[in-house]
Amino acid sequence: MSVRYEPGIDLESITAIDMHVHVEVDDCGHRAMPEDLFEASAAYFKSQERTPSVDRIAEVYREARMAAVLFTVDARTALGHEPNSIEDLVAGAARNNDVLIPFGSVDPRTGADAVVGALYQANELGVRGFKFHPSLQGFDPAREEFYPLWTALEELALPCIFHTGQNGMGAGLPGGRGIKLRYSNPLLLDDLAADFPGLTIIMAHPSVPWQDEANSIATHKANVFIDLSGWSPKYFPGSLVKLSNNILSTKVLFGTDYPLITPQKWLGAFAELPLKDEVRPLILKDNAVRVLGLDHT
């Protein structure tokens, strides 16, 4: 029988919520991606501990007095590779519900099955949101063939994280291993935000080379946010830092991309950014509490 997740986070006891953590291996040792993509991404990010278990991730964040949103990506159609077990991920988060928050993932290219899977993960497993990677999954999120899925997710009222911008997956491989960057242009998500105003959309990462577009969308659409994962803050585009300090101060979210970037490394560089003292806690924790609905659970 599948385990259902229920949150158990004491918000007063944590200092931050990392909105972007990957689970790259499940309880059976199955990896989330084919080996060549693993090797390419490890070289790109120069990561060391590449496949920590869910329990190990919980240890890292518990020791740091942080909570973390964790997920895998279902890209079975594009990669010809079965995804990690969502059930294992949720069970691990349930064992560590004082620090972990599970998101689900479905492959939009599976059509009606994606809708069924999303409803199962939300209603039966208790996932608290969903993760999509348009480039890795090989789909244009603005195409109307995927609108039944966005309709279902809007009705569930759970936030969705979408990869945007540059892609470490496939970096340096011939043809980028067939992964197309244009699917991660944030302007495609502007269509979703307009057509599904009840759907909370989180644009993952600084959206280089489309940062101005991402800034504009997050400013214009009340239901759109930006997570700051995947880059060391010392490399953030200046426009993102500037707007995070004022008009986007309630729209940006702490995220690392762990295990590719550690919380300690990210926070060390974040401390050097020219941000107002009152903005830092919004980015590190308060905005995420609101987006995740943890303030009324």
Image (tube, rainbow, N blue to C red):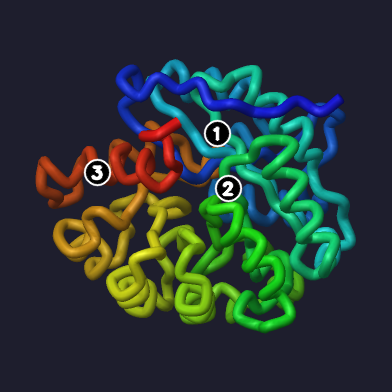
Cα distance in 3D space between marks 2 and 1: 9 Å
Residue bearing the label numbered 3: 282
- Residue 221 at x, y = what percent? 35, 72
Q: Which mark is residue 28?
A: none
Tell me which residue sits at (55%, 46%) in the image: 46
Question: Which quadrant is home to the C terminus?
Answer: top left
Give whichever of discs 2 and 3 has the lower sequence position. Answer: 2
Residue bearing the label numbered 1: 101
- Residue 172 at x, y = what percent? 65, 67
Left or right of 229 in this view: 177:
right
Say if residue 142 shows up in the picture: yes
- Mark 1 burial class by Cα count in 10 Å: few <14, some 14-19, many 20+: many
Say if residue 47 shows up in the picture: no
Q: Quadrant of residue 217?
A: bottom left
Give whichever of discs 2 and 1 has the lower sequence position. Answer: 1
Residue bearing the label numbered 2: 129
65 is higher (above) or lower (below) than 269: above
Cα distance in 3D space between marks 2 and 3: 20 Å
- Mark 3 burial class by Cα count in 10 Å: few <14, some 14-19, many 20+: some
Check disc 2 and give the amino acid type.
Answer: Gly
Tell me which residue sits at (54%, 56%) in the image: 161
